[in-house]
Image (cartoon, rainbow, N blue to C red):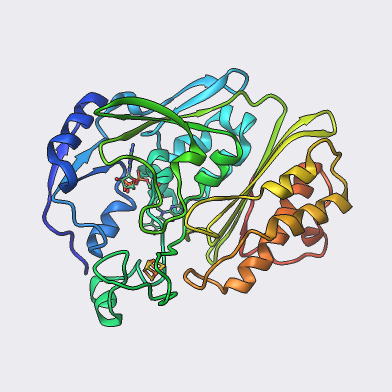
Amino acid sequence: MMRLPPFSYVPAVSVPDAVKLLAEHGPEAMLVAGGTDLYPNMKRRQFEPAVLVGLRGVRELAGLRGSGKAGLSIGAGTTLTAVSRHAEIAASYPALAAAAGVVSTPQLRNMGTIGGNVCVDSRCNYYNQSYQWRKAVGFCMKKDGEICLVAPSSPRCWAVSSSDTAPVLWSLGATVRLVGTGGERVIPISALYQDDGMHPLTRRPDEILTDIMLPPADGLRSEYLKLRRRGSFDFPVLGVAVALAMDGTTVRRARIVLGAVASQPREALDAARLLEGQSLSPELIERVADAAARPAKPLDNTDLTHPYRKKMTRVFVARALRRLAGLPDRAERAGESRAFEVLGS
Ligand SMILES: Cc1cc2nc3c(=O)[nH]c(=O)nc-3n(C[C@H](O)[C@H](O)[C@H](O)COP(=O)(O)OP(=O)(O)OC[C@H]3O[C@@H](n4cnc5c(N)ncnc54)[C@H](O)[C@@H]3O)c2cc1C
Ligand code: SF4
């Protein structure tokens, strides 16, 4: 059995209190919300904080305000279960309800928060292992070692962004509020991420993510499809988030964002541009799916093979667009197995 290393737990009672505690303990401290990612990572010695600043008691972090019509603000401490079951989210941002509802298992969704999900650590087959396993193969540069075991000649880490909600929030045009010792700032969620497996977040060490803000839904249609081996448990090895702002049958604005193909969610900009000003036709969907799969360059460091994951990017983008267009799904018609796929809205 893997045990937690020793640490002190200091519960915060408010956001300013959490900021103060985080600053007081400096680089020794980490934030913990639901702990569903952090505690297992600590057991594997991927993180060894001496102090954990607990956010569970910070009431102002939990809950939702606003509406789909006016725009919605989600407190970072809101549980994934609450997000997935919220009527306004289900009606106006169905892809987000779907993504939150397919994270891990019901127990973890009851504890896990959306803030923790947005900030979840990047993953790799050579890193998400016990200390003894990592020691036996020779540690890698993300923790305790010098080189990358996936690409030994590479100067960087390629660990994979593995959040289900991050690509969806990006596709919906969400912004996030960060509060630190220097005050607060609001940035697009796309700016929270960077393509660096070691440091996938641009969050400053003294900052707390307090809110996630969604713009008014205004004719928005959205979809999230997730690829994983076990439909009731696993992290995504591919996530496809599509959001279309429609004027009648014409696409006014499109965003396609891929999860689990790089160290940050990856936006398929060229593919989305093909959709704008057009009606969704089967021919256009095929062209867009081809274009969307191009920037997806999965590496051999998660579950399922990377050529297969690349092929599935094309399949999932086409499938998501067909659903949003109300066109019949070819896989469903052919009775193809959906064991690997978890549906969005
Ligand atoms: C078996 C298993 C399966 C899983 N499957 C999935 C999956 O399918 N999809 C998926 O996306 N995730 C999955 N997870 C990861 C995790 O359960 C979720 O990502 C969850 O949403 C994390 O939220 P949390 O509140 O528990 O975060 P924590 O574990 O408390 O924290 C996660 C990280 O976020 C930071 N953090 C937390 N809150 C804040 C904040 N307000 N401001 C700044 N930083 C913060 C912490 O310091 C830590 O680095 C899985 C985990 C396990 C153990
Ligand atoms: S991509 Fe390389 S450096 Fe990064 S976690 Fe995996 S093996 Fe380690």
* In the image: residue 84, left or right of residue 241: left
* In the image: residue 115, left or right of residue 191: left
**In the rendered image, which quarter contains the C terminus?**
top right
Q: Number of labelled discs?
A: 0
| x then y, percent, for residue 278 | 85, 39
* In the image: residue 24, left or right of residue 39: left
Which residue lies at the image location 31% right of the left edge and 71% below the top edge?
A: 140
Above or below, comparing residue 154 to residue 234 in the picture: below
| x then y, percent, for residue 43 | 23, 62
Which residue lies at the image location 63% right of the left edge and 19% below the top edge?
A: 69
Which residue lies at the image location 77% right of the left edge and 52% below the top edge?
A: 288
Above or below, comparing residue 197 to residue 102 in the picture: below
| x then y, percent, for residue 74 | 45, 29
Which residue lies at the image location 69% right of the left edge and 24% below the top edge?
A: 218
Above or below, comparing residue 305 to residue 202 in the picture: below
Q: State the image quarter where residue 339 is shown.
A: bottom right
Q: Quadrant of ligand 2?
A: bottom left
**In the rendered image, which quarter contains the N terminus?**
bottom left
* In the image: residue 243, left or right of residue 330: left
Given the current orientation, which residue lies at the most extreme bottom position? 136
Which of the pair 236/148 is nearer the observer? 148
| x then y, percent, for residue 20 | 17, 29
